[in-house]
Amino acid sequence: MKKQVKSWLFGITAGILSIAFAACEKDRGGENTDRDATYKAILQAYVDGTVIPTYKALAEAALEMRTANEALKTGQSATTIDAAAEAWKQARVYWEQSEAFLFGPVGEDAFVIDGHIDSWPLEKNDIDEVLANEAVGLDGRSCWKKEAEVIGFHVTEYLLFREGKPRPSLSAAELTYLTAATDALIWDCVLAYVAWAGENNVAPNIRTVFRENPDVLEFYEDVPAFQQFGEKLKNATNYRSFADAFSQIAAGCADILDEVGTTKIESPFASNKVEEVESWYSWHSLLDYEDNIVSVRNAYFGSRGATAPVANSLSAFVAGADSDLDARIKAGIDDCITKIRAIGDGNKSFYEVVRDQINREQVEAAVEACINLSGLFMQIARLVE
């Protein structure tokens, strides 16, 4: 997430209000119970098949980062540094594949997890200040309280990578900072998982990590409206209708598609500022963007890793109401992935594309594909009653 407030492309979905939405009244008089049952079944499949498995994978991958860091602390070598870099990349995949559902617990009105762990560009002067004056004795708990620009995915990336490759070595201060920032990142990833799934529905080792930092636990307990959010979404709790809750799926897809096209791809290329390229130290940018589209496909098809829609999915619903729109969305998803891959022309990072101002035609085609697909998802609103 760039340092900006996201705006929903559907406006603000009718049932998604602020933290105070817990008090909103529901008026469901005269609703079609068959229609609501359809919405509920799709919401259940979406939460259980897409959202929670993605956050589970993210939490587990974040813990692998800790394991890799412990090995790195024991002894720096090409093997241990490469392992730490690969652990970062794997966690990054699952985070980017969650970005079609950056609402609820991870959003601005709840635990602000997106902004806390995925803010860019970095504040390099502030990072250097931490390395120079705070690294000795720095721990995860103090790191978790810091501003987003000096923690999160992109700070750990900065410490591990240069020019798309793992660094040959880290200083003692950098290694301490990496360890502390990774702990803060782990707690946010686990917080996202627990908030969606409920603490009692995660494995004991995840529950233990969730309770490592008293500040995280206190933060979580202070925001009950977003606890066990998966159940709240499935049952349209605190939404004015099942239709409003159901509309959130398409809204999340439309929002990330617009962000990929306009903010992640178009903006840095147009400004020719490599520092605005997300994940540019690792040269992971194009994979980030592709995984964002995968997140859209997973949300639309109703299951993480699905290659075709499940029975109770947003795609199945759209196909039943407007088969042409469904076909266009499916084709649009494939088109976005193809055109994002084409930006690098098989051998260039997006950092290099922006730096050298090359492949303009491919960049423009990818931007157009993302914006067009975002518009198709916005059309789903007319099908929801």
Image (tube, rainbow, N blue to C red):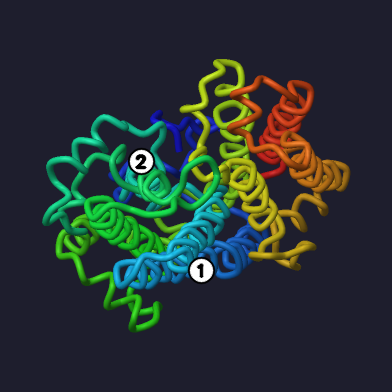
Q: Amino acid type of disc 1?
A: Ala
Left or right relative to 361: residue 291: left
Query: As rendered, which of 229 and 175 lies closer to the eye?
Result: 175
- Residue 294 percent across, percent down from the top left: 67, 52
Q: Is residue 162 above or below residue 179?
A: above
Quarter location, residue 346: top right
Image quarter of residue 175: bottom left
Residue 108, labelled with which disc? 2
Of marks 1 and 2, the one in the foreground: 1
Mark linked to residue 57: 1
On the question of residue 234 being in view, the answer is: no
Secondary-structure class at tag 2: loop
- Horizontally, residue 374 falls left or right of residue 75, namely right
Three-letter code for the amino acid on which mark 2 is drawn: Glu
Up the image or down, 337 lies above or below 4; here it is below
For the C terminus, the quadrant is top right
Q: Position of residue 30 (x, y in %)?
A: 57, 52
Decide which of 202, 138 is in the foreground and name it. Answer: 138
Q: Give the crowd class for mark 1: few <14, some 14-19, many >=20 residues within 10 Å.
A: some
Residue 262 falls in which quadrant of the image? top right
Is residue 342 visible from the viewing direction of this image?
A: yes
Residue drawn at (63%, 47%) of the image:
287
Q: 42 or 56: which is nearer to us?
A: 56
Label disc, if present, on residue 257 of the rendered structure = none
Does 273 sit left or right of 140 as displayed? right
